[in-house]
Image: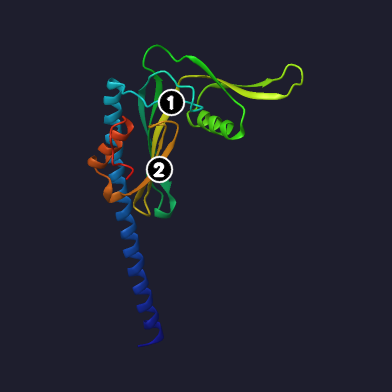
Amino acid sequence: MSFLNQLKTQAHALRNQQTAAQLSAEARVAQTEAACRTVANYLADLAQQLNVIAPPAPAFTLDGKTPWPAMKMADFRCDVRQKRLHHMGGVDVTDYIGMGWRVLPQVGPPVKAAVSVNFPPELERVEARLALGHLKHERLEQRHPDTNKLLAIRFEYTTELLGSVRITPDHDQCSFAFRISNATGFEVQTTQLATTDINPGVLDELARLLVGQPSRFLR
């Protein structure tokens, strides 16, 4: 075999490998996009039902000592955003799927409340929870009238916050990252699932988690 024919054989083998890799990547994208549609349709339907039910929310407290009134989850809404996979020829795919909601008092409108903190760990915890819940608030310094020494930080806030689920697919790895904020209190919970694990049964476990029922979603 001539050297040119050897090169032709090598090039043919490489083209076959590249074609197989491209087909495999396209299959992963298609499989992940199908799972995205399953998730998006489920959450859209779930949001409609929860907007009618307005399920009770978990107990909330900024400082661990000052309880909020009994709260409910309301105003559920869904969003699907897209992005372009340039390494796949510019195909448009799902960037993320989101569902957000408001947490409001079960009776009456949100009310004004306040907490005061004077130790750094407690201050950091309260500030983190304010940021996580996107709470409207004011930060006030309480000082000694004579010495001007800082005595405490007072946070005045409104008893209303935001919760969310953000689901981000990885089309190359055939996986989904779930980020759940303020569904069980002031906290973020995360987990990752393979695309092949996305089905209505798994999403039912997510729904149970969101409404405070026993759930195996994070196990």
Quadrant in which the C terminus appears: top left
Q: Quadrant of residue 200?
A: top left
Mark 1 neighbour class, 10 Å CA radius: few under 14, some 14 to 19, many 20 or more: many
Amino acid on which the number 2 mark rests in the picture: Thr
Residue 132, how many percent across, how many down? 49, 32
Residue 134, how many percent across, how many down? 50, 27
Mark 2 neighbour class, 10 Å CA radius: few under 14, some 14 to 19, many 20 or more: few
Amino acid on which the number 1 mark rests in the picture: Phe
Between 4 and 107, the residue placed more toward the observer is 107
- Secondary structure of the residue carrying tag 1 is loop
Please indicate whether residue 157 sits to the left or right of residue 167 in the image.
Answer: right
Instruction: Check the image and tell me how it is coloured.
Output: rainbow
Residue 182, how many percent across, how many down? 42, 31
Q: Which mark is residue 190?
A: 2
Residue 138, how many percent across, how many down? 59, 21
- Secondary structure of the residue carrying tag 2 is strand
Residue shown at 69% from the left, 25% from the top: 150
Please indicate whether residue 27 sits to the left or right of residue 147 in the image.
Answer: left
Q: Earlier in the sequence, mark 1 or mark 2?
A: 1
Q: Which mark is residue 22?
A: none
Q: Which residue is mark 1?
A: 60
Quadrant in which the N terminus appears: bottom left
Q: Nearer the viewer, mark 1 or mark 2?
A: 1
Classify 15 as above or below 44.
below
